[in-house]
Image (cartoon, rainbow, N blue to C red):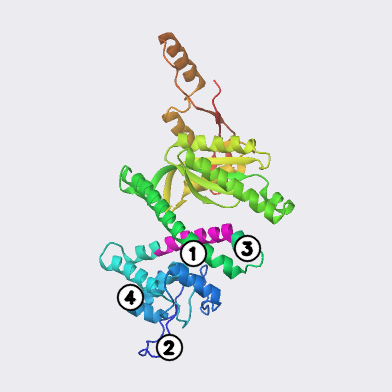
Amino acid sequence: MTVDDSTSGEEAQPPPPPSPSSDSPGHPNPHHIVDHTAEPSDDPLAIRLEQLILGAERRYTPFQAARTAGVSMDLASRFWRAMGFADVGQARAFTEADVLALRRLSGLVEAGLLSEPMAIQVARSTGQTTARLAEWQIDSFLAGLIEPPEPGMTRTEVTYPLVELLLPELEEFLVYVWRRQLAAATGRVVQAADDDEMVDRRLAVGFADLVGFTRLTRRLEEEELGELVEAFETTCADLVAAHGGRLIKTLGDEVLYAADDAGTAAEIALRLIETMTHDETMPALRVGIAFGTVTTRMGDVFGTTVNLASRLTSIAPKDTVLVDGAFAQELIRTGDVPASEAQAAEAAARAEKEGAVPPPYRFGLQPMWQRPVRGLGVVEPWLLGRRTT
């Protein structure tokens, strides 16, 4: 967002602020380059659609929007960039909704509910998440936008009424899902053992990776490859959610998920392997899981535990699940696997003698050879499987 040098019919405007540098807090770094010459489209259909979606017409320049919202030009620019939008030069591109959004964010800061860096983070996380959602939805609806239901209809005649019908329904659904997700996330936070655990938590983190995906990209047509990736991501997302995990992100041929306990993460991993193995259209799968302290930021997870899970995935044979020692110990602690086969046999014999049900061990663990893992030293992976006896 760039300050105008002059605006017809308006009072003189101040000079533009200094160019942001990569070292300035809240400003884009070299990995977030914005187009300072970008201007809104003048295409009549694009303008009509924009007005329909935003519910208002373009009215303000960047400076006018900031002034009307009662915020500094610098803060307005930082909010705008954090939301993921390019600078628009001197264009009259902003609406009443933009002014209201600036006013609300700055109001949260002024009221002391959010610090300025936190408000910037809120803008950035919301912008990144909804940008991906919007792109996905447009990709999904693209066929409806370019294939008229009746011969002879133009794109204009198809697009506008379709968006007009979808918009209120999608908006209500988005708010509903967001509230549901917010309730679930809040519940996890308030159940944390202490304040430190709210940010640095002990979690099970798993990576599931398609084997030989690079070779597939050279063999399959683009449409076939897209369908395979979509099927893989959909299957993983459904299984992770159904069994109590959280899908953190998808990376085409790989998904990252987390779970609050080792048993849940193990069940998800084995279900993924079993499901993919029975799907002839899918390549082989491998999974790596680690358990330990994880730092959470903006919906993502970081730390040594995440790196270890990734490394275990890279060395796992196809159609197998490898876990680290901490994960194995956690399964033993929770009673999902026996500490040893001798212990399992004793427990079974004691239960039979007393007429009781033997311990319901769900999984089996087999130690593998110790090996060096780049950046993490020597680790001893364990092969995870279902317990058959």
Q: Is residue 12 left or right of residue 267?
A: left
Q: Which residues are magenta?
A: 123-142
User: What is the C-alpha distance between the residues marked 1 and 4?
Assistant: 29 Å
Quadrant assignment for the N terminus: bottom left
Task: Judge the density around disc 1: few (<14), some (14-19), many (≥20) Cα neighbours within 10 Å.
Answer: few
> Which residue does the image show at 50% across and 45% down from the upper left?
257
Q: Nearer the viewer, mark 4 or mark 3?
A: 3
The earlier-in-sequence mark between 1 and 2 is 2
Badge 3 marks a residue whose secondary structure is: loop
The answer to whether mark 1 and mark 3 are in CB contact below 8 A is no
Asked if residue 332 is among those painted magenta in the image, a careful observer would answer: no
Q: Label 2 belongs to which residue?
A: 5
> Which residue does the image show at 42% across and 82% down from the upper left?
3
User: What is the C-alpha distance between the residues marked 2 and 4?
Assistant: 19 Å
Q: Position of residue 353 (x, y in %)?
A: 43, 9
The earlier-in-sequence mark between 1 and 3 is 3
> Which residue does the image show at 42% across and 71% down from the upper left?
80
Q: Label 4 belongs to which residue?
A: 69
Badge 2 marks a residue whose secondary structure is: loop
Kindly tell me whether residue 380 is visible in this rendering: no
Query: What amino acid type should be assigned to the residue bearing mark 3?
Result: Pro
